[in-house]
Image (spheres, rainbow, N blue to C red):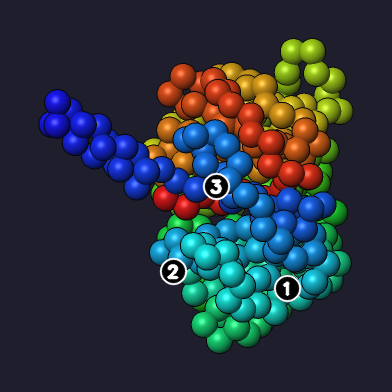
Amino acid sequence: MKKMLLSGLLLTMSATVTAETVFVTLEKDNALAIVDPVGGKLLKTVPVGQRPRGIAISPDNKVLYVATSDENTIKIIDSETLKELGRLPSGDDPETFALNPAGDKLYVSNEDDSMVTVIDIAKKQAIKQIKVGVEPEGITVSPDNRWLVSASETTNMVHWIDTKNHEISENTLVDPRPRAATFTADSQQLWVTSEMAGTLMVLDVNTKQIIKTIKFEATGVTSDKIQPVGIAIDKERRRGYVALGPANRVAVVNAQTFEVEKMLLVGSRVWNLAFSPDQKRLYTTNGVSNDLSIIDLENMAVTKSVGVGTYPWGVAVKP
């Protein structure tokens, strides 16, 4: 009996230790929601600043970076205590940003100024501003740290920026209003969503050219509601997942054949996506239904919806 009780206790402790935490920015609550995804519940919300949107976690999982757009800064938050540790000079109205793999530089899209701001995190200084196309939003760094890519919504281009000199090396014309960009884990492909065309474009990194364009369709949903935004691609490049905005669906894309395998119904106006550390679950922020959807990727099913607060936007996961 004692052995059974001890075994049960150890299992409980193990589950507690290994369970991750999900952080969600709440644009209209000026807050950060903290969610236990395994228990499927909101733990608490904490004030974080005016109009928080973009969020990322450092490679060592100790620090959160949160773009508070109306304060024109990116805040550094302790991921354990949730206390503010400092601020980074992001330029005007930061919304989206990307961390490099080493976690020592941060790249910010400045839509109003058609700029990308390069920040040295240790120095808390902006070390360069890169002129890009009109209304840059989507931004990402390749896992091999070779390329920084900025997508300009009005210019309809992705800009390939060399991370060594922070200069634009090449530009690729894409479908109208590109919203998000993500590299595959092997740094060989770049996936870009087009909000207006309702498409996903797959680009070959070596040639900088589009090798496949996927047009999304969903039964019972008019084409004007299909507005692709956030992207998540698994490490093995088996599948990619695309948030379709007001279509209220996540498209499951075979990352080898580029066929759309399934549409998963989630909350209203799905914005952004993040994997659990083991990539067995996917979390989506749903801006209009004010919740987080939890998707079981082994069964390809939405298992839970967790109310988090008003206008959830960005999402980050801590192991």
- Circle 1 — which element? strand
Per the model, the C-alpha gap separating discs 3 and 2 is 22 Å
Quarter that holds the N terminus: top left
Per the model, the C-alpha gap separating discs 1 and 3 is 22 Å
Taking the image as drawn, is residue 173 in sight?
Answer: no
Is 55 left or right of 61, judged from the image as shown?
right
Q: Which residue is mark 1?
A: 73
Q: Which mark is residue 22?
A: 3
175 relative to 153, above or below: above
244 relative to 145, above or below: above
Per the model, the C-alpha gap separating discs 1 and 2 is 21 Å
Nearer mark to the viewer, of 1 and 2: 1
| Tag 1: amino acid | Thr
For image coordinates 43% across by 23% down, the residue present is: 298
Is 151 left or right of 114, judged from the image as shown?
left
For image coordinates 54% across by 33% down, the residue present is: 40
Q: Residues within 10 Å of mark 1 (few under 14, many from 20)?
A: many
Nearer mark to the viewer, of 1 and 3: 3
